[in-house]
Image: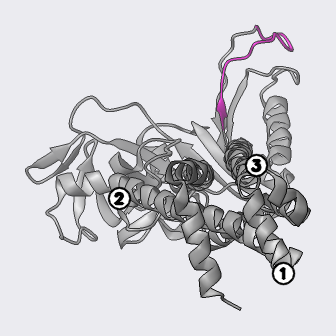
């Protein structure tokens, strides 16, 4: 039961030596503060990285041609080769675990205003791809829709424009769907406005890109059967790294490239990058727990040492209590309660201050502009931290309490 007199006595004992109590409590305060801040910082780093790669499928890989580094079958090294529509069809037919495959064409970067609507004009990139590219690299559609299979099959001159293209060529709030724009001298009907992830643009900044059907791009830009690059997405529970190896083997066979040539084919494996990020975040979290818990443990050791000193200073007081009938369990409970009080007060203040600091960091960064918390800890983490404080605070007083319990009344009263 809650004993008000006991806790009043604990408060008097703690306040009797204010500086020592403060310094002891500060060790615990700083330890739990560091633990929470480091964990919150690790969570924030993970959330920021997750936001940067949002909308990009983890089991995908981009592949494009390079220069051969090995002579093979009469061809000299340093030879350029080109991916073709035939390669895409063969890969799709022979690599069974491919969920989606989408070729991409990205012609030269324009140097003059190439997109015009009335008197408004701007300089933007043009990209040709399949409709299923939106399954690999998800676009947030603001108006209308993305490209579809009919656009591809019927060679429709339609386009999906990025947000900056929309802001340049259209009035704010205007629905652009159904309107025509002229790109590189050719008119296209706008069917949608959409952006991919602006922080990770492998095939160009989608905000400044005009996307048209792949078949239209090949025909109007005289690409013939050529493809600049393509992206493959693996089926669920299949490692895209395995499909990448199979795909590269097919490409090397189709274009007479040495099987051991490692520079002839370039690739960007999203799955491998995600794994690296995952290991990085795991390491950060482990380091946060090690450093934070180590700092907290040092503070707890300080509490235990100070309680030992306190027991030593109060030897006569404890002896008198024992002489007038105080039970050993009562003495033990008193010492452990003092240790717990110092640890709990300092610990909960440390948690509160750490959460406040993390919240201020959130506000300063604007939390990604969407009002969500980034640098914060979960409720489970806060409960675990509180339990750690309670357990360590109790254990910190256990040693001094046993020492106090062993004090004999006659020896204590005779001690100067």
Residue 264 appears left or right of 369? right
Q: Is residue 134 visible?
A: no
- CA gap, disc 3 and disc 2: 58 Å
Query: Which of the two discs, 2 and 1, labels the residue nearer the N terminus?
Result: 1
Where does residue 68 sit, x and y in percent of width and height?
Answer: 73, 16
Residue where numbered disc 2 is placed: 363
Name the residue beneath numbered marker 3. Answer: 416
Image coordinates of residue 268 in percent, x first then y, are 66, 37
Nearest the camera: 38 or 217? 38
Most foreground residue, 78 or 368? 368
Q: Nearer the viewer, mark 3 or mark 2?
A: 3
Image vertical order of residue 351 relative to residue 281, above or below:
below
Q: Which residue is mark 1?
A: 325
Quarter of the image for residue 236 reads: bottom right
The span shown in magenta is: 63-76
Numbered disc 2: secondary structure: helix
**Label 3 crowd bin: few (<14), some (14–19), many (20+), radius 10 Å:** few
Q: Name the quadrant containing residue 345.
A: bottom right
- In this rendering, which labeled residue sits more in front, label 2 or label 1? 1
Q: Residue at x 35, y 69 (%)?
A: 142
Q: Are marks 2 and 1 in contact (CB under 8 Å)?
A: no
Is residue 189 at least partly visible in the picture? Answer: yes
* Distance (Cα) linking label 2 and label 1: 58 Å
């Amino acid at each position: 039961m809650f004993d008000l007199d006991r806790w009043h006595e604990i408060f008097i004992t703690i306040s009797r030596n204010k500086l020592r109590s403060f310094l002891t409590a500060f060790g615990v305060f700083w330890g739990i503060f560091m633990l929470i801040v480091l964990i919150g910082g690790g969570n924030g780093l993970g959330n920021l990285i997750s936001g940067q790669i949002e909308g990009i499928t983890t089991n995908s890989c981009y592949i494009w041609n390079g220069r051969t580094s090995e002579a093979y079958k009469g061809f000299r090294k340093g030879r350029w080769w080109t991916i073709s529509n035939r390669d895409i069809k063969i890969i799709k037919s022979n690599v069974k675990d491919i969920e989606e495959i989408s070729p991409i064409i990205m012609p030269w970067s324009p140097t003059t205003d190439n997109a015009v609507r009335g008197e408004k004009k701007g300089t933007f990139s043009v990209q040709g791809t399949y409709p299923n590219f939106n399954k690999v690299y998800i676009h947030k559609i603001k108006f209308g829709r993305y490209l579809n299979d009919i656009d591809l099959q019927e060679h429709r001159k339609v386009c999906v424009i990025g947000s900056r293209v929309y802001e340049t060529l259209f009035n704010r709030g205007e629905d652009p769907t159904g309107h025509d724009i002229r790109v590189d001298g050719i008119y296209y009907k706008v069917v949608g406005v959409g952006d991919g992830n602006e922080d990770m643009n492998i095939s160009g900044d989608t905000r400044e890109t005009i996307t048209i059907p792949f078949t239209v791009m090949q025909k109007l830009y005289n690409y013939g059967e050529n493809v600049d690059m393509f992206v493959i997405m693996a089926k669920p529970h299949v490692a895209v790294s395995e499909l990448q190896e199979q795909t590269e083997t097919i490409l090397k066979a189709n274009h007479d490239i040495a099987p051991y040539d490692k520079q002839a084919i370039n690739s960007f494996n999203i799955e491998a990058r995600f794994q690296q990020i995952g290991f990085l975040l795991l390491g950060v979290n482990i380091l946060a727990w090690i450093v934070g818990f180590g700092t907290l443990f040092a503070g707890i050791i300080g509490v235990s040492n100070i309680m030992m000193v306190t027991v030593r200073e109060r030897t006569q007081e404890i002896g008198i209590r024992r002489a007038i009938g105080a039970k050993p369990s009562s003495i033990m409970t008193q010492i452990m309660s003092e240790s717990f009080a110092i640890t709990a007060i300092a610990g909960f203040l440390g948690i509160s201050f750490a959460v406040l600091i993390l919240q201020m960091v959130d506000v300063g960064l604007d939390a990604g502009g969407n009002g969500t918390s980034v640098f914060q800890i979960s409720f489970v983490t806060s409960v675990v931290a509180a339990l750690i404080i309670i357990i360590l605070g109790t254990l910190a007083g256990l040693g001094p309490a046993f020492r106090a319990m062993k004090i004999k009344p006659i020896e204590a009263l005779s001690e100067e």
